[in-house]
Image (spheres, rainbow, N blue to C red):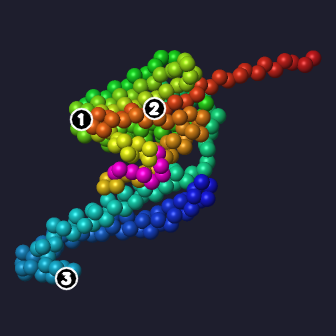
Amino acid sequence: MVSLGILVSGVAHEINNPNNFIMMNAAICKNVWNDVKPILQRYYEENGDFSLGGLSYISQRKDIGNLISDILEGGTRIQRIVDSLRDFARQDSGDMDGLVNINAIVESATSILKNLIKKSTSHFSVEYAPSLPTVRGSSQQLEQVVINLITNSCHALQNPEKSLTISTAYDKDSDCVTIRCRDEGMGIAPENMKHIMDPFFTTKQSTDGTGLGLSVSYGIVEKHNGNLEFTSELGKGTTATVILPVYHGTEFIVESVS
């Protein structure tokens, strides 16, 4: 895994450099095209049709702007994939010694994703368990997990009438805190369930799926000595549950020596 991380990090770097050139130059081309369009249109009105890149201007004038926009969109998608690759390859464990308030983590994640949630569903709710015990680890990394789970649920919802519920709880029997993300989305096919946390596995190749989000999330939860579990029924929805052990800190009393 360390060797894979080094390889992936290097590949991400090599992809990102030329992609930055593509996105920067495409943005310049888009601005140039917007400036030159009225000039070309006037020339067309005064002189008739003419050749542009080997094709007639009249057949291309609506498509060129879309072609440039497609290049920018493709570059943006590559950038998202590179960011996911970097997350996957990152070996830095961060600050794992913090005391984490799980309710605060969920509140922050839902605030960040407010617009996506509002766009995806008209039936969103959050249920916070009172007086949750603390968890030891990285607030930033655990927030990343919650953001990824909520984002996946939003993408799975087929229309705004489907619901999404986030809840926190404390299980006394296991002495664990849980975060549950339950959606009424399309669900996961049984044959895909065993692969959903495999690196690069995705059922969203035609959109923005990189297949790294759940793998990264699983790694983070595992690093916190926890577990990430899924239950799903095709056509009815999915429930993702993060299970984290409660931290029982020990207070040390230092006695003065006379």
Query: Disc 1 designates what residue?
Result: 160
> As drawn, is 6 to the left or to the right of 28?
right
Tell me where residue 120 sits by quadrant: top left
As shown in the figure, which amino acid type bears the numbered disc 3? Answer: Gly
* Placement of 154 over or under 133, stated as above or below: below
**Secondary structure under badge 3?**
loop
Q: Nearer the viewer, residue 231 or 55?
A: 231
Q: Position of residue 106 (x, y in %)?
A: 45, 30
* Placement of 100 over or under 40, stated as above or below: above
Q: Position of residue 52 (x, y in %)?
A: 18, 79
Disc number lying in front (1 or 3): 1
Q: Are marks 2 and 3 in contact (CB under 8 Å)?
A: no
Other-residue count near label 2 (Cα within 10 Å), few / some / many at <14 / 14–19 / ≥20: many
As shown in the figure, which amino acid type bears the numbered disc 2? Answer: Thr
Q: Nearer the viewer, residue 157 or 30?
A: 157
| Residue 110 in view in this figure | no
Which residues fall within the magenta stretch? 197-204
> Which residue is farthest right?
258
Query: Disc 2 designates what residue?
Result: 241
> As drawn, is 7 to the left or to the right of 202?
right
> As drawn, is 227 to the left or to the right of 21?
right
Q: What residue sits 54% from the left and 38% below the top?
A: 221
Other-residue count near label 1 (Cα within 10 Å), few / some / many at <14 / 14–19 / ≥20: some
Q: Are marks 1 and 3 in contact (CB under 8 Å)?
A: no
- Of marks 2 and 1, which one's residue comes earlier in the chain? 1
As shown in the figure, which amino acid type bears the numbered disc 1? Answer: Pro
Disc number lying in front (2 or 1): 2
Query: Disc 3 designates what residue?
Result: 54
Q: Position of residue 238 (x, y in %)?
A: 36, 35
On whether residue 255 falls in the magenta region, the answer is no
- Of marks 2 and 3, which one's residue comes earlier in the chain? 3
